[in-house]
Structures are given as C-alpha cells and as structure tokens.
Image: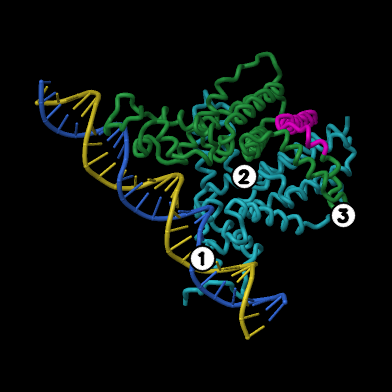
Chain colours: A cyan, B green, C yellow, D blue
DNA sequence: CGCGCAATGGAACGTCATTCCAGAAGGGGG
DNA sequence: CCCCCTTCTGGAATGACGTTCCATTGCGCG
C-alpha cells in the first residue's frame, strides 16, 4: 500500500488552498495543540519542505485557516429581509457563535488580528446594521467595535473552555461535578457562589451568550431612546 | 562568578511559592510563548528536576501564576464604601482590567478554568454586588456570569492583541498604520469600515472596554426598571 | 524535444518540555 | 555523635516539535 514517493514536482499539485483545507480538518480533529506538521504532511502525503513552499510557517497557516472558517460562515448567512436591524444583528451574532463553536481553535485567532480579511468583513456587517438604527453616527465606531469584541471574545472563551474538556468525557457530567464543588464551598466566604451553584448544572453556553448579547442590545435601545 | 553548584538539598530551599514568583516575573518579561524552563532554571539557579519536584508541569505552573496574579488584584482593591453597587461593579471591573493588562499572558487562563480559586472569588465579588441591586434573584446567575464573562473575555482579547505587537514598536504608530489601511479599502464593499477608519487612530482599548461595560450596565438598569 | 525553474520529500538541526537517576544535605532516633 | 532515610537537587538523556536546507524531479514554455 504505502509506497515511497518519488521526489520532485507532482501532477496532483499542492496549493495554498489544499494546505489550508487540510489544516482546517486537522485543527477540527485535534485542536490547536494537537495540530502538528507531522500530521499535516502525513495527510497530504508529502514532506515538510513542500508545505513550507506554500506557507511561511505554522502561525501563518493557522491564521489562514481561521480566516477561511470566518469566510465560510459569512457567505453562508442568508439575508433575512424585512427584519429590523436589531434582530438581524442578533441572528448574525448567533450564527458566528455557532460556526466558531464548531471550530473552537479558530476563535482566539479571529480577534488577535483585525487585519484578517474576513474578520474585517464581519465588522463591516455589524457596522452596516448599526447604520440602519437611529443611533447617532458619531457613536457607530464605539458601538460596532463593542459588539464585535463581545461576539468574538466571548465566543473565543466559551470554545476555549469547552476544548479543555477531555474528549470522551460527558459535558453534562462535568458541569454537574463542578456544580457540586461550588455547592460544597464555605457559605461564609462564598455566599453568592454557593447560592447559585444549582443554576450551574442546567447552564448552556449559547443561552449565556445570548443573554449577554441581549443585555448589550437593551443598553443600545436605552441609549437610542434618550 | 557563576560557579558549578553542588547537587543535593540546599539551604535556601526552593518552594512552590518561589517557583511561581519566578514564573510570574518571567511571564511578564517574555510572555507566555517566550517563557521556557531554561529561562526559569537559569533564574532560579537550579535544574529542571528541582522545578518538577514542586510543580507537575508547565501548564500547572502557568495556571498557578495566573491565579496568583488575580489573587493579588483582588486583595489590592479598596472597599469604596458609600458608593452604589453599580459604581462599585464598574470600579472592580476596571481594576481587574488594569491588572490583567499588566500581565497580559494571564487573562486567557483566568477564564479557561473557573476552577481557579481566585477566579471564583472574583465571581463571588461580582455576585455580591448584584445582590445589592433590585434585580430579581432568579436572574442573578445569568447576569453575574455575563458580566464575569464580558470582563475576562474582553480583557483577554485586548491584552492578547496588545501582546502581538513586536516589543519596541510604537503602539500609536501601529494604530495609525492600521487606520490608513482601513481608509484605503474599497468604499463599495467596505462602506462602514472606511467611514470609521479615522476613529481607529485615536482609539483606546480601556475606553472601549468601559464603553461595552456601560452598555451592559445600561441594559441591566433597563431591565431593573421594568 | 530539451531546458529552466517551480515544487517536492526528507534528512538534519536546534529548541523545547519532560523523565530519570545518582547523589547530597537535613534532621530524627539510637 | 553518628548513621540513615526522607526530601530535595542538578543535569544528562529522551523524544516531539517547528524550521531549514538541498539534491532531485518533472511540468510547461519555447
């Protein structure tokens, strides 16, 4: 089966796109930490040198992979005509949240560099929706970036936390375990945490995210009313 | 000067605390990526084995260092008596922001594990302040975690982005450069981004953070009013 | 049809976290 | 006072990783 490959140029050429696609797959499977050039060259049936011909280094590859994921998420979003801007903002945010949830390694990189082409497109979308509200134009920059930062940051952290869990361990079981630990704390020093420990058990990250987003939008509406 | 050390037990004993302190220093100086066991053993004038006697591995060490930083931040915060809970919440948040800004490597770890002793204390503080508001008790869990998540996530990303910059490069110059790149985009596809490009030039992360926080608190007040 | 150069595969290198272990204090019991 | 054993130490050894280097190849242009 596995035969030693001949050196030199190949017919089924490697390309930046092919490399990035393979990287996204492997990142999805093994996470950022588990993603290595060894895995990558094995999947692509090639050597390290070939990969480095198309990509500067590991960092750039992960960067490109993250941008690709955001790009797919943005193009795969329907226009949702007729709805008011606030609703569409909410839809957009949750859609990005879900996408990054499926590629948990990507989120931290999306924010690190606003330079990323598709990340900028995301900011553009948010800003476009804000323009349709009655909010004063001089606040648009602050508000758009705030929503952008909330969206990317919180998602990044949610997914990072989720990725911490050992693969194969039940998520609900882990939450239950954590809730029990909270409840077992000293109520004298932790009156609040012990009181809300039960809530932790039936807690959903996505709902949590939506709650914060709604709070932001409520704040926005409150400012709008003034 | 530098003399070969004899093996075996030493008078000036190493301890978990000493190791963690040195780790915090080196993390501040070199960031998470630049922090290596080589640097650590050189500073502590010892070998790797000695460090591993006190600490399980690199991950645990960074975890302990991050918790230590949060602990210092929480104990170093004055009580601010007389102020209303909302103001105190704002002060607390900005204080944590500033602390994590000074130890940019720490922020990502603070959120990853809510298990961290001092991270839980932070959640407790936030919850305690919420209890003093007129908000319904059944919403306390959702709101406290929302604020907690906003605080830690956004700070984490701000500091991560700041750490990306090459040491020695002027931050304002970099922002100006970025603003120029935004302005140079095609106004047809990026109407919003090109319009707000100028704002990016005189933009401050801390103000930005405060804006989002105020938006959250506005939303909170709006819900309170209902 | 041959030649140049874009592309390739893998060996080699330096760095890193981690493991392993021989050996040296410290201190308690005889 | 001295021996022993637990606790702690330093550094050599290991294996995985990202990256560099280069001889070699075969596509596609002339």
Q: Could you confirm whether marks 1 and 2 are on the same chain?
A: yes
Quote the CA–CA distance across marks 3 and 1.
46 Å
**The N terminus of chain B: image quadrant:** top left
Q: Secondary structure at mark 1?
A: helix
- Name the front one of labels 1 and 2: 1
Q: Is residue A126 visible?
A: yes
In the image, is B162 to the left or to the right of A219? Answer: left
Q: Position of residue B216 (x, y in %)?
A: 74, 33
Mark 2 chain: A
Q: Count the marks: how many?
A: 3
Residue B62 coordinates in the image, percent (x, y):
49, 37
Residue beneath the point at 52% across and 51% down: A33
Circles 3 and 1 on the same subunit: yes
Nearer to me, D21 or B80: D21
User: Are discs 3 and 2 less than 8 Å apart at CB?
Assistant: no
* Subunit that carries the residue with mark 3: A
Q: Position of residue A154 (x, y in %)?
A: 66, 42
Q: Main secondary structure of the magenta part?
A: helix
| Left or right side of B203 for B27 | left
Q: Name the residue tied to disc 3.
A: A81
Residue that label 2 marks: A158
In the rendered view, tell whether residue B38 sits above or below residue B133. Answer: below
Return the disc, 3 or 1, that comes first in the chain's sequence: 1
The stretch in magenta equals: B198-226
Q: Which residue is mark 1?
A: A42
Name the outermost residue toward the top. Answer: B82
Q: Chain of mark 1?
A: A
Residue drawn at (46%, 40%) of the image: B36
């Amino acid at each position: 089966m596995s035969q030693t490959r001949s050196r030199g140029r190949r017919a089924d050429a490697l390309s930046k796109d092919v490399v990035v696609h393979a990287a996204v797959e492997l990142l999805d499977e093994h996470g950022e930490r588990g993603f290595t050039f060894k895995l990558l060259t094995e999947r692509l049936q090639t050597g390290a040198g070939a990969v480095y011909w198309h990509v500067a280094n590991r960092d750039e590859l992960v960067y490109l992979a993250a941008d690709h994921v955001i790009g797919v998420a943005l193009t795969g979003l329907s226009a949702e005509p007729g709805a008011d801007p606030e609703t569409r903002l909410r839809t957009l945010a949750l859609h990005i949240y879900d996408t990054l949830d499926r590629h948990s390694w990507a989120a931290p990189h999306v924010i690190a560099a606003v330079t990323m082409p598709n990340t900028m497109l995301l900011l553009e979308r948010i800003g476009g929706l804000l323009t349709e509200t009655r909010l004063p134009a001089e606040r648009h920059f602050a508000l758009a970036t705030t929503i952008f930062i909330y969206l990317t940051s919180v998602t990044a952290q949610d997914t990072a936390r989720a990725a911490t869990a050992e693969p194969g361990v039940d998520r609900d079981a882990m939450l239950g375990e954590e809730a029990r630990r909270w409840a077992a704390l000293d109520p004298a020093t932790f009156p609040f945490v012990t009181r809300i420990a039960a809530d932790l058990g039936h807690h959903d990250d996505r709902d949590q995210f939506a709650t914060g987003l709604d709070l932001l939008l409520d704040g926005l509406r409150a400012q709008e009313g003034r």
